[in-house]
Amino acid sequence: MKKMMAALLVAGIAMIPVGAQATDVAYKQDTASVQSAAEAKFGLADKVYGSFAALKQAVPSAKMEDYKHLNDKLVSAQAQLGATEYAKFEVLLGQFGQFVLKFADENGSVDPTKMNADEQAAFQTLVEQLAPYFDQLNG
């Protein structure tokens, strides 16, 4: 009986590392799923800024909850504008996002004083092109 208990004990101890590795693999798979779900969850906001990490690097005060809120607003805009108009809006927003990433101050406001004359003109044109969409979405 003692030999059988000793054999079971050795077998149990031998299985612990395997179990720990299996748990580690499962944990890594779950973590990867959560990350990919989070990435998919913010797909529309990511089309504007590239990713939350890119926005956070340009605007240190950016918060994930604000990024989620932006994504939620974009989902609503997509439904409100329809596929064709939203596609045009999304292109303009992507351009606006690039201005934010390049010229935003620490609070996320685009600072035109950091731009040269051509960039200022392009930014002004972009704002004018976006205005009707914002009027429609907010009206």
Image (cartoon, rainbow, N blue to C red):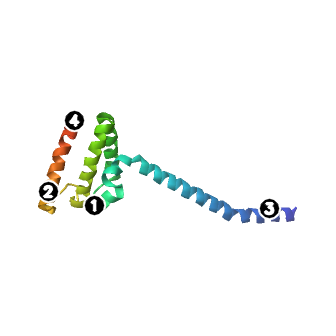
Chain-order first, disc 4 or disc 3: 3
Q: How much space separates mark 1 and mark 4, taking CA atoms?
A: 29 Å
At horizontal 88% and vertical 61% (from top left) the residue drawn is: 1
Query: Image check: 129 left or right of 56?
Result: left
Front-most of residues 81 and 30:
81
Q: CA distance from mark 1 to mark 3?
A: 58 Å
Kind of residue at badge 3: Leu
* Foreground of the two, 135 or 94: 94
Q: Secondary structure at mark 1?
A: helix
- Under circle 3, the secondary element is helix
Q: Which residue is mark 1?
A: 58
Residue at the (77%, 66%) spot, across then down: 10
Identity of the amino acid at label 4?
Gln
Question: Contact (CB < 8 A) between labels 3 and 2?
Answer: no
Between the C-alphas of marks 3 and 2, the distance is 76 Å
Question: Label 2 belongs to which residue?
Answer: 120
Residue 88 found in image quarter: top left
Q: Callout 1 environment at 10 Å: few (<14), some (14 to 19), or many (20+)?
A: some
Q: Earlier in the sequence, mark 2 or mark 4?
A: 2
Residue assigned mark 3: 8
Depth check, mark 3 against mark 2: the one in front is 2
